[in-house]
Structures are given as structure tokens and as C-alpha cells.
Image (cartoon, rainbow, N blue to C red):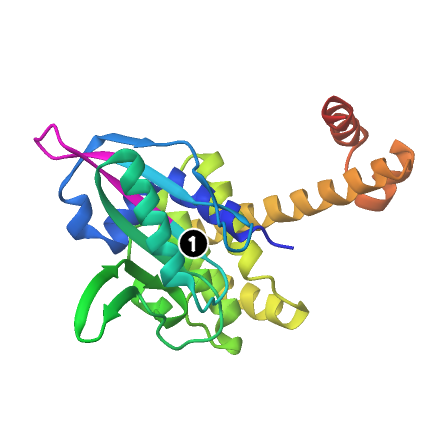
């Protein structure tokens, strides 16, 4: 099972300003960027269902050239939910009660289906009297066109293109374009791995698609092609290491694992030592 919330939280907390630049320029223009700090994850209990809910990301920011702060609450929603807007209001109300600050609520709808526009408000009325009108900013990825982000020099664009409106036959091309954009950003290895791992998680290709993907890479410039192949090689290495760890857990000998995976004895022994420390 893919832990969608963890993946999105890691992406957005690492590239928070870039996320705001890409989707909420009207917000980021009012922020003192050096003031951003992430607050501890809030856990709320739904007394009607007995479930505990954790909000995904809560950032405190200071207005530009002011002493006043506000909160940005970002929630990733990976499945459609009838009462979701009501849940967002409950989060807002409890956060507002606790912090007594202005809150800017944002939702990323990251599911593939359905593609209808999701509600982005919660309304309470009594006859013709409007008791409450709560709204949140909504980014529905499956209604965005990935081609519109091809020239955005932004790591969040490189990652989230993999979750936008993609026809089945476009999947290999989109994966290649995500990596081409990533290769132009010149990120450090850890951040490069974060983006590339995100893309690979959501655009896993079958054998036929892999051939189309490779053909798309072959049409690129030499520098981009070399950097992309380094990323692909790192994916393959991670996959082999995962197989090796599973075999170590099953008790297979180091020498046998090297024959199965092609990893060196030293590499398998390092994984073995890491596994021992974790246990």
C-alpha cells in the first residue's frame, strides 16, 4: 500500500515555498519567507465516529514587514469523500480555537478518479439565512494538464506532474518529462532522490511502457540523458537493495544473495548491518 499522506507531507515540507510559488503566488507574496516554521502534527478525535484524524501539514508564517503571524494548513486528500468539506471545517474551527490566528486552508486532491470538480466549501443555512460559508483553496491534480507545467523550473512541478490528468498512453512520456525537468534543477542528491522516488512511485511502468520511456529519453540532449540515466540507475539499485533486505530477513546467506541480486558482498553486508541496528 502506498502511504500517500507521508509522501505528500515529505514533498511539501521539503519544498514548501516552491509549492506556494507554483500554486499560491498570492499567498507567498505576503509571507516573510524566513519566518516559516512547521508546527507539531495535530491529532483530532471525531467523537461521532470514534476515529482519530491527523492533519497533514501546518505552517506558521509571518506577514511580510509585519509582526502578525498566520497559519497555512495543507491537507492531502487521496480518495474522494462525501463529507470531506465538513471535515476541513472541523479542522479549521479547532485550529482557530487553539491558535487564534488567521488560517489559510489548502487541499490537494490527489486521487485519479473521479475527475469531476470536488466541492471546496462547507455551508450551513437556516431557511434563507446563511449561518456559515467556509471555503478552502483546492488544487485538484487530476483536473490539471501536465503539459502546462513542462517549463516550470520548480521541483514540485516535476513531482506533481506524475499525478495530473494523464492518458494511459502518455504515462511513459510524462515520466520522461518529469525527470527531464528534474535534471535541469540541479538539486542536491537527497532532494533529487525525493522527487525521483515520488515520480517512480506514481508512474510505475510495465515492460512495453518502459521501452517507450527509454525511447523518449534517447531523444533528449546528452547532458539531460546522462543525468536521467543516473536517476534510473539509482531506482534499480534501490530495488535490488529491497530484494536483498527481504532475503536477509528470510535467512538467506550473503553469498547466495549476491548471486541473486548482483550486489557485491560489501553492499549486502552493509544492508545486513543496517538491518541488525534496526532490530
Determine the residue positioned at 37% across, 67% down. 146
Picture residue at 73% right of the left edge, 22% below the top:
277
Q: Decide: few, some or many residues near mark 1? Use Cα within 10 Å; few <14, some 14-19, many ≥20.
A: many
Residue 166 at what x, y percent from top left?
45, 72
Confirm whether the magenta stretch covers residue 71: yes
* Above or below for 137 versus 129: above
Pointer 1: what residue?
76
Instruction: Give residue 111's position: percent from left, percent from top.
Output: 48, 65
Residue 202 position by quadrant: bottom right
Quadrant location, the C terminus: top right
Q: Which quadrant, please, contains the N terminus?
A: bottom right
Q: Position of residue 210 (x, y in %)?
A: 61, 66
Q: Eyeballing the image, is 52 above or below 65?
A: below
Magenta region, residue range: 61-74
Quadrant of res 177: bottom left
Q: Is residue 68 left or right of residue 247?
A: left
The majority secondary structure of the magenta stretch comes to: strand
Residue toward you, 276 or 54 = 54
Residue 16 sits inside the magenta stretch: no
Amino acid at each position: 500500500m502506498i502511504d500517500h499522506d507521508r509522501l505528500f507531507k515529505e514533498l511539501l515540507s521539503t519544498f514548501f515555498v516552491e509549492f506556494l510559488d507554483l500554486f499560491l503566488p498570492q499567498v507567498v507574496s505576503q509571507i516573510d519567507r524566513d519566518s516559516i516554521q512547521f508546527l507539531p502534527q495535530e491529532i483530532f478525535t471525531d467523537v461521532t465516529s470514534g476515529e482519530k484524524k491527523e492533519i497533514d501539514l501546518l505552517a506558521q508564517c509571518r506577514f511580510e514587514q509585519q509582526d502578525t503571524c498566520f497559519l497555512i494548513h495543507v491537507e492531502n486528500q487521496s480518495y474522494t469523500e462525501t463529507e470531506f468539506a465538513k471535515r476541513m471545517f472541523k479542522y479549521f474551527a479547532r485550529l482557530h480555537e487553539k491558535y487564534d490566528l488567521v488560517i489559510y486552508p489548502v487541499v490537494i486532491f490527489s486521487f485519479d478518479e473521479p475527475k469531476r470538480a470536488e466541492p471546496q466549501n462547507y455551508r450551513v443555512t437556516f431557511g434563507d439565512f446563511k449561518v456559515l460559508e467556509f471555503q478552502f483553496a483546492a488544487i485538484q491534480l487530476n483536473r490539471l494538464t501536465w503539459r502546462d507545467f513542462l517549463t516550470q523550473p520548480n521541483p514540485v512541478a516535476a513531482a506533481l506532474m506524475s499525478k495530473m490528468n494523464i492518458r494511459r498512453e502518455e504515462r511513459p512520456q510524462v515520466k520522461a518529462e518529469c525527470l527531464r525537468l528534474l535534471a535541469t534543477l540541479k538539486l542536491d542528491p537527497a532532494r533529487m532522490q525525493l522527487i525521483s522516488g515520488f515520480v517512480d512511485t506514481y508512474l510505475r511502468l510495465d515492460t512495453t511502457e518502459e521501452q517507450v520511456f527509454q525511447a523518449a529519453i534517447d531523444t533528449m540532449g546528452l547532458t539531460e540523458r546522462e543525468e536521467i540515466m543516473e536517476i534510473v540507475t539509482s531506482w534499480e539499485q534501490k530495488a535490488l537493495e529491497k530484494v536483498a533486505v527481504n532475503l536477509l530477513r528470510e535467512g538467506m546467506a550473503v553469498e547466495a544473495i549476491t548471486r541473486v541480486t548482483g550486489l557485491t558482498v560489501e553492499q549486502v553486508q552493509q544492508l545486513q548491518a543496517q538491518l541488525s541496528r534496526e532490530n
